[in-house]
Amino acid sequence: MRDTLYNDAAYYRMLFASRQHDLPLYLELAAEAGGELLELGIGAGRVALPLARAGFSVTGIDVAPDMLASLAELAAREPAAVQARLSWLLGDARTAELGRKFRLVICPFNGLAHHHGLGELAPLFATVARHLAPGGLFAFDVLVPDPVLLRGGSSSVAWMRHPRTGEVCRCDEDVSYDQAKELLTIRTTLRFMEAEREPEVLTLVIQQFYPGQTEKLIAELGFELVATRPELTDAVGYVCRVAG
């Protein structure tokens, strides 16, 4: 997998456990759609678990085994009724074929940004089209490019405890931006201060989507825009359907 950040679910959850402002959008759409929904990039269940607790059935796909292992651990703590509404599989969303259709497909928290350029986004949208029931909706959100991150640079946290092992670490983060490809790379190095072992390096490479680009992309890939949802603070939500 290209983004090694997702090889450490504990660190990922530490970074984003408090992110909740996108949940109302997906809960609202699930209520409108009814029936079972498909989540591309289900991860550790940050969105799927609240959906299942609210009574919605969620099937998820993710390419990161460690994230799905974390989801399994968290789901096991839920009541049996919530567990029964959750299912997931390991796989690439660009090639997935479930043989079923859904009224709603979602790809939360900048999931599109892990698919770089039309060569990777086109098969992702094709997967969505294959799995949408007639009249079904595809909802996703993309982060607004941050000028501070685009300038690049380095920062450090001198002392922290690793969320998985409890070891004392120094955390160094390096950010760079490839303007030609519109790719932002964040490289995090966790250096273990009390043990003689190799640092843990976690990388994240994400496509940037600028104002107007996403709407153009939706049309270019055979979908039509139904609504935009700009209330996500650092992101914009999009709701679309297969054109025609």
Image (cartoon, helix red, strand yellow):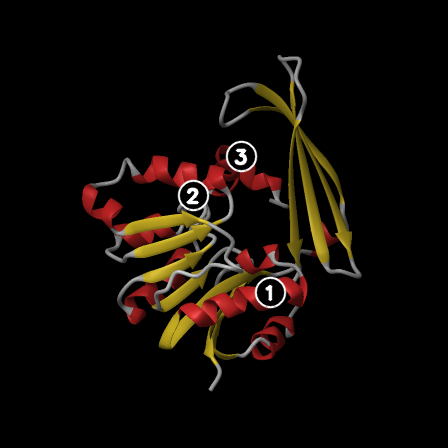
Which residue bears the numbered disc 2? Answer: 44
In the rendered image of this protein, does residue 5 appear above or below residue 238?
Answer: above
Q: Is residue 209 visible?
A: no
Mark 2 surroundings: few (<14), some (14-19) or many (≥20) residues within 10 A = many
Tag 3's secondary structure? loop
Q: Is residue 181 left or right of residue 19?
A: right
Which residue carries the number 1 mark? Answer: 121
Q: Give the Cα separation between the discs numbered 3 and 2.
A: 11 Å
Along the polypeptide, which appears first: circle 3 or circle 2? 3
Q: Secondary structure at mark 1?
A: helix
Say whether residue 183 is left or right of residue 217.
right
- Whole-number angstrom distance, CA of label 2 to CA of label 1: 23 Å
Report the front residue among 122 and 13.
122
Foreground residue among 124 and 234? 124
Q: Residue 225 bears which disc, if any?
A: none
> Whole-percent x and y of residue 100?
34, 65
Q: Label 2's element?
A: loop
Marked residue nearer the N-terminal end (3 or 1): 3
Query: In which image quadrant can residue 21 be found?
Result: bottom left
Q: Is residue 106 visible?
A: yes
Query: Amino acid type of disc 1?
Result: Leu
Q: Residue at x 34, y 62 (%)?
A: 37
Measuring from the top left, give residue 2's x and y in whole percent.
Answer: 63, 46
Q: What is the CA distance from the residue labelled 3 to the residue labelled 1?
A: 25 Å
Query: Of circles 3 and 1, which is in front?
Result: 1
Q: Amino acid at mark 2?
A: Ala
**Viewer-nearest of discs 2 and 1:** 1
Residue marked by disc 3:
8
Q: Is residue 48 above or below residue 220?
A: above
